[in-house]
Image (cartoon, rainbow, N blue to C red):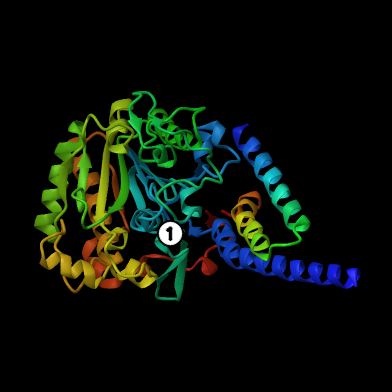
Amino acid sequence: MIMIAYYVITAFVLVLFGWNFVREKKSRDDLVLYLLVMIPLLLRLLRVK
Amino acid sequence: MKDAGMKREFLFKAILAGAFLGLVLWGGLPLFRHRHYDVPIIKGPGVTAVLRLSDFSPRLKGTAGDTYVFVLQGKEPGGKALIMGNTHSNEPEGMLTALVFIENAVVEKGTIYVIPFFNNSGSRNTRPGDGYPLTFDVPTDWGSRRFRFGNRDASPLDQWPDPDVYIHFPDRQLLSFLDVRNTNRTWPGRPDGPLMERVTFGAMELMRRDKIDVAVDIHGAETMFPVTNCIVAPEKSVKIATLASLTVKAMEGFENHVEPSPAGFRGLSHREIGDHAATMPFLLEAPIPFLDQPTGPKTTKFLLDGKDPFLLSLSRKKKLFVPYDETGWSLEKRVGQNLSVTLEIFRQFSKKTADRPIVLRGVPRYADVVKNGVGRYLGDPAKAAAGGVVMN
């Protein structure tokens, strides 16, 4: 149950960062940072790491 | 003008996202392949049945904790033994010792059970911070055999989240949070506990139901760790361990001293198996320089030959707990001594308990493996008979 909740939270946070990435207009640094933070979340959601 | 700006922004974001996706694939694909790579195991001439650990711990079924149990039953009745490799999956000499038994042993009296990948989940995990290789190849007479190189603990993909502190069952001793994924801290386990407790519970049930006399859990330990190059045994196993230690030293010329199993440190196989079953447990530790911290790069070559200039320097300063020279501690020496000590434990047990002998043939000893290499005793899965290979 906790495991499922963890994956739901991971997916939710991933969507939030993805949405921020799409909406970001000014800072290129922020764009890179959004993507960097998304990497471990994506790897866990794909059950790679 | 606005459209051109939007187009440029979209293009930039698409290229940036594509580059990061490329990074994810570049780093992630090898890990994915490692996790899903199955090792072929040839059913040797002595294998009479292949079971699953979930046959003894039903809640393991369908999980990454489930693993194969090879049964080698002799024609005549006798004692029963269990051999476990890869309790810690970054100590591969245990798994290779188990494979040499599966692919070569013919049991004449008694029954031997072999679990080559005891922590199956751990063998599909890695420790990237230490630069571990994901796989390693053992050269053979016909080519090479590839094996997964895993981690000490189960993968968090299979057991998560970790607690702040692991409260051992049933003694309630407080252990490190990480030990909840360590199959040498979760003994004796419980049927509905965390995944690794279900793994150890499966092995305990196997030992209790099938009345196993002797359990050998094979590990490797750092050369700078005091409990290395030894047999760890509790009170009930110490006589046989001592006789085995003295015999291999006298007859085969290598050191393997006996360490007492501490009664106050819970969760370890050499303690809990004996306390929760009639079985006599033995834990073997062969020195594996690869696991030491102050070494050069953790390469596959180093894993196999055990040669490192930094350890050599430390050895000259008497900082190691085992003799160490230019010859290193090769995989051949480690697997060879595990094989000889295990065979000697069986022989001493059979002498002591004449009505339950464990007699087998076909397994090489220390000198054979050091001379011929481990690969000499590993078959070619491509040439195995139909149905003669198990993918683990």
Residue located at (13% from left, 43% from top): B242
Number of callouts: 1
Is residue B194 shown above or below B170? below
Please name the residue that numbered disc 1 is placed on: B129
Q: Amino acid at mark 1?
A: Gly
Which quadrant holds the N terminus of chain B?
bottom right
Residue located at (22% from left, 69% from top): B310
Q: Is residue B70 at all visible to an observer of this figure?
A: no
B34 horizontally vs B231: left or right: right
Residue located at (73% from left, 48% from top): A15
Residue B42 pos. (x, y %)? 48, 59
Among the 4 quarters of the image, the one containing residue B378: bottom left
Among the 4 quarters of the image, the one containing residue B197: top left
B135 horizontally vs A22: left or right: left
Q: Secondary structure at mark 1?
A: helix
Residue B182 pos. (x, y %)? 40, 42
* In the foreground, A37 or B293: A37
Within-10-Å neighbours for mark 1: few <14, some 14–19, many 20+: few
* In the foreground, A49 or B379: A49
- In the rendered structure, the residue with mark 1 lies on which chain? B
Is residue B255 shown above or below B16? above
Residue B77 pos. (x, y %)? 34, 38
A10 horizontally vs B260: left or right: right
B287 horizontally vs B158: left or right: left
